[in-house]
Image (cartoon, helix red, strand yellow):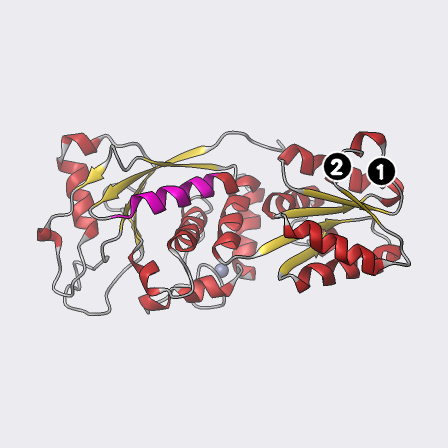
Amino acid sequence: MIHSCQRKTITFAQLGPLETSTVEQALFRANELQTAFYFKPEFYNYRLPLDEMYRLANGGYDLCGAVKHSLLRLKEFRKLPRPLIVLTSALFGDADDPNNPEAFYFSSQEDDYNPKVTIITTQPSEELAAFNLQQYLFMMLSAHILSTYVNISYHEQRGCLLDYDDEWRNDDNCLNSGALCDECEVEIQKRLRGKQITIEEIAAAIRLFNRAIRKKYCFVVMPFSADFDCVYKAVQEALEEKGWEVKRSDDVAFSRLITESVLREILVSDLVLADFSGCNQNVAYEVGLTHALGSDLLLIAQNPPPFNLANEQTVLYRIDDLEHLKIAVQRAAGSA
Ligand SMILES: [Zn+2]
């Protein structure tokens, strides 16, 4: 079980107003970024009505009521595929609190009649000055995967994607958090061990979230030897100067199974940088995994790599001239 090619399909329908072309582009990019889910926009075929009767006193709409009525009463919508995400750009109000000027939601899962239907509004993206609609959607999809498929729930504020926020206009807190908290990581590990989720599904959520916050991540594999510490430091400095986050395989300590941790890091990275000096066997294994998973790879080496890697993009460097390596790595990362 290294890599599953089975993608879970999630269908998208439209409710009332929606910028469908921008959303379709975002879903297309989301499909390119990860391999676990296929986000299938069906806005042309499935367009649910949003009547004025669902409008609330505070200007929002009772979207849950509108979706529920369409899916239960209208024959053409009753058999929509599941899981289903219903998207709208309408303001998402609360039918139980129709006068409250602060009572708005981003999304809701329709537990009362169908747990496989989720409603998401794109409206809050209009309030976020620093983030566009695509980034907002990536964040919502990431949170959706984690809450639905990984089954971890929103919690109090602790600098995590899944911080629950009472102030609905402070949505960018989640985007600014930049990471998952340790408690969420522990939950993820438990579910991975229990085989309730796959590494690909976790990686999909993390890839989407990283892209939402414009984070670029490089995973570095090299022999476990103090001789390479100065090489790692040079690579790390070069990439951090360009705004990348950099980790080495021995920094990755969450899982008891080293191969699982490495697999996850390769899946979530924008670039895998491998030092092939001395043809180390662990490095060879991880380069093989990177090839199999189709992630971007940059080889560095003090001597030319073996024949069957000769076509790979390779930076040859000398240990007494790491400045040259830094410049070459920055150049290669610029195109990743
Ligand atoms: Zn958390």
Q: Amino acid at mark 1?
A: Pro
Mark 2 or mark 1: name the one nearer the start of the chain: 1
Q: Nearer the viewer, residue 74 or 207?
A: 207
Q: Secondary structure at mark 1?
A: loop
Asked if marks 2 and 1 touch (Cβ < 8 Å), the reply is yes
**Quarter where residue 90 is shown:** bottom left
Q: Residue at position x 49%, y 48% from top?
A: 205
Q: Judge whether residue 29 is colored magenta.
A: yes
Q: Quadrant of the N terminus?
A: top right
Read off the residue under disc 1: 305
* Secondary structure mostly taken by the magenta-highlighted segment of the chain: helix
The residue carrying mark 2 is: 312
| Image coordinates for residue 39, horizontal then vertical, percent | 40, 38
In this view of the protein, can residue 184 be seen by the observer? yes
Residues in magenta? Answer: 18-31
CA distance for labels 2 and 1? 9 Å
Structural crowding at the residue carrying mark 1, measured as other residues with C-alpha within 10 Å and reported as few (<14), some (14–19) or many (≥20): many
Provide the secondary structure element on which disc 2 rests.
Answer: loop
Q: Is residue 236 above or below residue 118?
A: below
Residue at 11%, 64% (x, y): give it. Answer: 57
